[in-house]
Image (cartoon, rainbow, N blue to C red):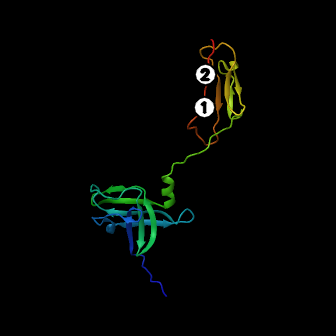
Amino acid sequence: MSRKFTPFNRLAVEIYDSGTTLLNDPDLDQKLATIENFRKQYPGGIYADASFYVPRPVLRYWLVKGAQRVIFRNGHEAAYEGWINDLAYTLGESAQGVRVPLVNGVEQFLMNWTLRKPWADQRIDESVLKWDTTAQGAAKFTIDRNAQIMFIPKAEAMALNDRCKVKYTAPTGQTVKRVTFNYDLQEGGQ
């Protein structure tokens, strides 16, 4: 049993609307598409980046948009699979068209995910939360670090700008997005 060889000059572009449904192409623009390049790589997915160009009026509406699946086929075999990154409209003196750059599946997956850090920094020692003893009124407070960071005012009269400050040092390369805390302001007789 021999396998029929498909020549490499029969590359065609298929654009999918969703999943396995081919995009409706009433103007037959996909037939005019010229594949500029495509690469394969390993590791990180089989396919790398690619692009193709379609000569067409740039002001005419086109159903093609970003994040649609594209397959380059050589006969019936898939030669490349990727997703549309963006559309680059080109307008020249003698020609106009759309250049369509593609990204591979791994890049598409990563571009659509927001990175979330489901952890909280629960370090409460002196190396992370430094008490600023130079702040006006710092001597009028005590700091409790027993499984928490608690500011305890001493039984002394407070002036207008008396405060207690603790400076937080985030882990290397990290940023603080939200600080959550509880407070209980119980003012007795003044």
Q: Which residue is labeled 1 in the image?
A: 181
Q: Quadrant of residue 79?
A: bottom left
Quadrant location, the C terminus: top right
Q: Is residue 159 above or below residue 144?
A: above
User: In the figure, 149 relative to 105: above or below?
Assistant: above
Whether residue 148 is situated above or below residue 77 in the rendered picture: above
Element under disc 1: loop
Q: Amino acid at mark 1?
A: Phe
Query: Helix, strand, or loop for circle 2?
Result: loop
Task: Tell me the residue at 59%/14% (across/down).
Answer: 160
Residue 185: numbered disc = 2
Q: Residue at x 55, y 62 (%)?
A: 44
Give x and y (percent) for residue 11: 40, 72
Circle 1 crowding by C-alpha within 10 Å: few under 14, some 14–19, many from 20? few
Q: Position of residue 28 (x, y in %)?
A: 29, 67
Residue kind at label 2, given as amino acid type: Leu
Residue at 51% over, 48% down:
114
- Residue 17 percent coordinates (x, y): 37, 61
Left or right of 179: which side holds 103?
left
Of residues 151 and 94, the one nearer the viewer is: 151
Distance from disc 1 to disc 2, alpha carbons, whole Å, reads 13 Å
Q: Hey, which quadrant is residue 4 in on the image? A: bottom left
Instruction: Give the camera-side residue of 183 and 9.
Output: 183
Residue 168, x across and y down, in percent: 64, 33
Q: Which image quadrant is residue 65 in?
A: bottom left
